[in-house]
Image: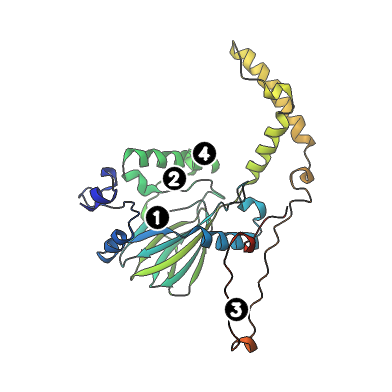
Amino acid sequence: WVSGRLGGRPGEQSGGGRAESFKTEDAEAALACHRAGGSLYFRAPEEVSDLLVTALSQQLGMSYGALHPDGAARSEVETFASRAGHTTDWHFDFMENFTLQLSGSKRWRLKRGDVAHPVRGCTPMWRRKDAAMLGAAEQQAKCHAQHSGGAAAFEPEPAAEELEEGCEDVLLTPGSFLYLPAGTWHRVECEEDSLSVNVSLIGLCWADVLGDALKQRLRCHPAGRAPLCLHSLAQGRSQLADALALLAKEAAALRPVDLLPACMPPPRPLQLALPLASEADAEPAEPAEAGPPRRFRRNP
């Protein structure tokens, strides 16, 4: 009934017919499910996300790579209202995660992964769901195999015993703060009802910076703008050889200052003065709205 009325799909059910997850925009329905033993996951309001994500990413030196071209943050803030006994099985993420435990406790098991700076996550539990989830898991496996030195060097669904051997065991209690590097295998179990906030940071990688720059440089040449047109494999390879020679020439001409000019230094964070102890009894100032003028912004 819950699955049908609140947006669950048949593929999101376990073999026993119990709904594993579903989406709903009905806050009352979500609260009812939580009271009945379900765990909740939801995004923070955009205003909160902009403030937390942008402040943290800039202080960590992610600079303009933490922002989309329109200035919006690439990252997000998530809230987990989990019930006792809820478990998220072994997987790793492609984001840099910072988790703050607000209430309750969670036990994290951590193990270093084989893929440095992954561009996708790895979620083996998806392989046990519907066809669409299985396809996503297979794409993840192919991507990581390529980035870790070949299919033989990456196991997309390692045995739990293998991951648990030598893993780190961390218990988060109220006030605990955990940094989880991208690519770290982890399993999370709630030992009691829990509330936590997670900041997921996603940055621009150098491959994207260089790839976009070279694309713009190649488009400055007629040969780079020419459409693919070939009548034989030999003809196509000949055209490609010319294009690769042009690519090498443009790549050799690029300088770091071309891609990171003086007008693009790290953004200047807004400095907000904290009240002094002697001012504690003073009349509190009217809180300023956290609007666009008070957020971190890139230099013009």
**In the displayed structure, does residue 217 sit left or right of residue 145?**
right
Q: Residue furthest top?
A: 231
Q: Amino acid at mark 4?
A: Gly
Front residue of this view, candidates 111 and 45:
45
Q: Alpha-carbon distance for marks 1 and 4?
A: 22 Å
Residue 223 image-quadrant placement: top right
In the image, residue 25 above or below residue 213: below
Tag nearer the camera, 2 or 3: 3
Q: Which residue is mark 1?
A: 90
How packed is label 4: few (under 14 Cα within 10 Å), some, or many (20 or more)? few
Q: Alpha-carbon distance for marks 2 and 3?
A: 57 Å
Q: Which residue is mark 2?
A: 155
Residue at 37% from the left image edge and 51% from the top image edge: 159
Residue 161 image-quadrant placement: bottom left
- Of callouts 2 and 4, which one flags the residue occurring earlier in the amino acid sequence? 4
Q: Alpha-carbon distance for marks 4 and 3?
A: 60 Å
Residue 227 on image: x %, y %:
63, 20
- Of callouts 1 and 4, which one flags the residue occurring earlier in the amino acid sequence? 1
Q: Alpha-carbon distance for marks 1 and 3?
A: 48 Å
